[in-house]
């Protein structure tokens, strides 16, 4: 299924860029996406960018870019955030946090938040030595099935 909208943004490693990201993301909102869901995904995006700045790019120059791509489909939205940090095992970290929940260490809450908001969350190393955080959320119900179902049965 082709995307109905796709947009890319490249930013410096600087938390001061967060308002620019949120403004850019807001301009991408589509009427078929419930406002509440959109705001939750906006929060996940803010957490992803903040983690890239604070953790992945911790010892990097502010000029090192962070790339963000938003792709909106008829029934889902995908956000990709690329960073130049060291590789990181997201699922191992989430598992460790879950088993150590009673310790309440205070770290990693952004990861847990992103996981709770998204239907799919992954962090993989790319061929160009970057990392790509992928967040996917299906919002579909009726809007995701209507057009496809009609054409599939004709």
Image: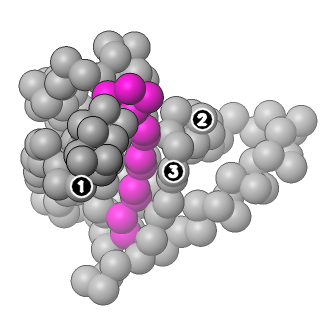
Splitting the image into 4 quarters, where does residue 4 fall? top left
Q: Is residue 120 above or below residue 17?
A: below
- Using the image, determine if residue 66 lies above or below residue 136: below
Residue 106, image quadrant: top right
Q: Residue at x 13, y 30 (%)?
A: 28
Which residue in the rendered view is the most extreme toward the bottom? Answer: 127
Q: Is residue 9 above or below residue 144?
A: below
In this figure, what is the number of numbered marks? 3
Residue pointed to by mark 2: 116
Segment tinted magenta in the rendering: 131-143
> Which residue is depicted at the point 47% across and 63% down?
123
Element on which disc 3 rests: strand
Residue 9: x percent and y percent? 11, 48
Relative side of 42 to 26, left or right: right
Q: Position of residue 116 (x, y in %)?
A: 59, 35
Say whether residue 137 is magenta.
yes
Instruction: Please indicate, yes or no, whether residue 92 appears anywhere in the rendered image.
Output: yes
Residue 6 drawn in magenta? no
The front one of 57 and 31 is 31
- Cα distance between the residues tagged 3 and 1: 18 Å
Q: Position of residue 32 (x, y in %)?
A: 25, 22
**Residue 83 as seen in the image, left or right of residue 97:** left
Quadrant (top left, top right, bottom left, bottom right) of the N terminus: bottom left
Name the colouring of the figure: one colour
Q: CA distance from mark 2 to mark 1?
A: 25 Å
Give the residue at mark 1. 1
* Residue 120, numbered label: 3
In this rendered view, identify the residue nearer to me: 20 or 113: 113
- Residue 96 x/y as whole percent: 78, 56
Q: Secondary structure at mark 2?
A: helix
Residue 22 disc label: none
């Amino acid at each position: 299924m082709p995307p109905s909208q796709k947009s890319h943004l490249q930013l410096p490693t600087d938390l001061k860029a967060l308002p620019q990201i949120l403004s850019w993301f807001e301009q991408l909102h589509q009427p078929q996406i419930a406002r509440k869901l959109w705001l939750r995904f906006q929060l996940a995006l803010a957490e992803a960018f903040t983690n890239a700045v604070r953790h992945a790019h911790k010892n990097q120059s502010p000029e090192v870019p962070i790339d963000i791509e938003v792709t909106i489909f008829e029934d889902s939205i995908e956000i990709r955030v690329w960073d130049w940090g060291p590789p990181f095992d997201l699922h191992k970290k989430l598992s460790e946090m879950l088993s150590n929940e009673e310790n309440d260490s205070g770290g990693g809450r952004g990861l847990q938040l992103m996981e709770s908001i998204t239907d799919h969350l992954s962090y993989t190393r790319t061929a160009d030595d970057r990392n790509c955080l992928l967040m996917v959320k299906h919002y579909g119900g009726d809007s995701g099935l209507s057009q496809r179902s009609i054409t599939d049965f004709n």
